[in-house]
Amino acid sequence: MTDTTREPDPTASAPKPLLSARKVRKSFGGVEVLKGISLDVAAGQVMCLLGPSGSGKSTFLRCINHLERIDGGRISVDGELVGYAARHGRIFEMNRREVARQRGGIGMVFQRFNLFPHMTALENITAAPIGVRGVPKPAALSRGRALLDRVGLADLAQSYPAQLSGGQQQRVAIARALAMDPKLLLFDEPTSALDPELVGDVLDVMRALAADGMTMVVVTHEIGFARGAADEVVFMDAGVVVESGPPASVLDNPQNPRTKAFLDSVM
């Protein structure tokens, strides 16, 4: 029998990252919160950002979709600069319409859900596809119902946010982000505002997305999720990347004393 197994080609170029950040800096009121963050996330990869409060994790996440303007460096998604465009050898900030177009491909799930209280779950999910993308209403409604089923809420399509638990609201928020068919999905501590008994259902949805190949960057304190779902764990402190690597390396055998001290405090 002929052996058809192919050895990896060491000369083959690595695929370009879906998300690339280079020397990203951000200050608020003279306080430098991000001090030159550089990292890459490949398509289909899950990266978890860990670190103490004030380390810059959430600020960095908000910079990825230009909710915060960076003061230095560059961020690109799928080869396109985020929030800026190069023209005639110079970098210009995009206008609001161009930024909104970009954000359509970069979904974000916030800590506090941010659902529209006057809209049903289904209306929250279909608002952006209809209003921003111009998706015909029947198609948007069909897609919205399918996404509600995907997050385990098919029977709550006509419920308003006030009628839903925190965990249910967060799952609607995830479905809303998915409705725009994002290339990249960002999670900013998605379980930190939930009662402990509601956390599991949200994490289960996130694990399923990871298993389906969704590219995700997750700011979290859920060490178990990071261990089981992440391809790479990044520990940040004081605006810099202190340590990064596979979960088994960073979580079980941290090399930096600051990483070890943090993990000892939360595990």
Image (cartoon, rainbow, N blue to C red):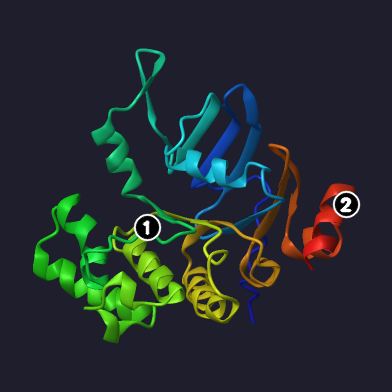
Front position in the image: 153 or 254: 153
Q: What amino acid is at disc 2?
A: Gln
Find numbered disc 2 in the image and state the secondary structure of the residue it sits on: loop
Q: Residue furthest bottom?
A: 155
The crowding category of the residue bearing disc 2, from other C-alpha atoms within 10 Å (few below 14, some 14 to 19, many at least 20), is: some
In the displayed structure, 103 sits above or below 199; it is above
* Quadrant that contains the C terminus: bottom right
Residue beneath the point at 27% across and 32% down: 96
Residue beneath the point at 77% across and 64% down: 266
Q: Residue 178, which numbered label? A: none
> Of marks 1 and 2, which one's residue comes earlier in the chain?
1
Question: Residue 108, percent across and down?
Answer: 42, 54
Question: Residue 256, percent across and down?
Answer: 87, 48
Question: Residue 199, percent across and down?
Answer: 55, 75
Q: What amino acid is at disc 1?
A: Asn
Question: Residue 63, percent across and down?
Answer: 49, 38
Q: Classify residue 267 as left or right of residue 3.
A: right
* Quadrant that contains the N terminus: bottom right
Q: Could one spot residue 14 in this view of the protein? A: no
In the displayed structure, 177 sits above or below 21; it is below
Residue beneath the point at 50% across and 70% down: 206
Front position in the image: 223 or 160: 160
In the displayed structure, 173 sits above or below 197; it is above
Q: Residue 255, which numbered label? A: 2
Find numbered disc 1 in the image and state the secondary structure of the residue it sits on: loop
The crowding category of the residue bearing disc 1, from other C-alpha atoms within 10 Å (few below 14, some 14 to 19, many at least 20), is: few
Distance in Å between CA atoms under marks 1 and 2: 38 Å
Count of all numbered marks drawn on residues in the image: 2
Q: Residue 114, which numbered label? A: 1
Q: Classify residue 215 as left or right of residue 124.
A: right
In the displayed structure, 11 sits above or below 127; it is above
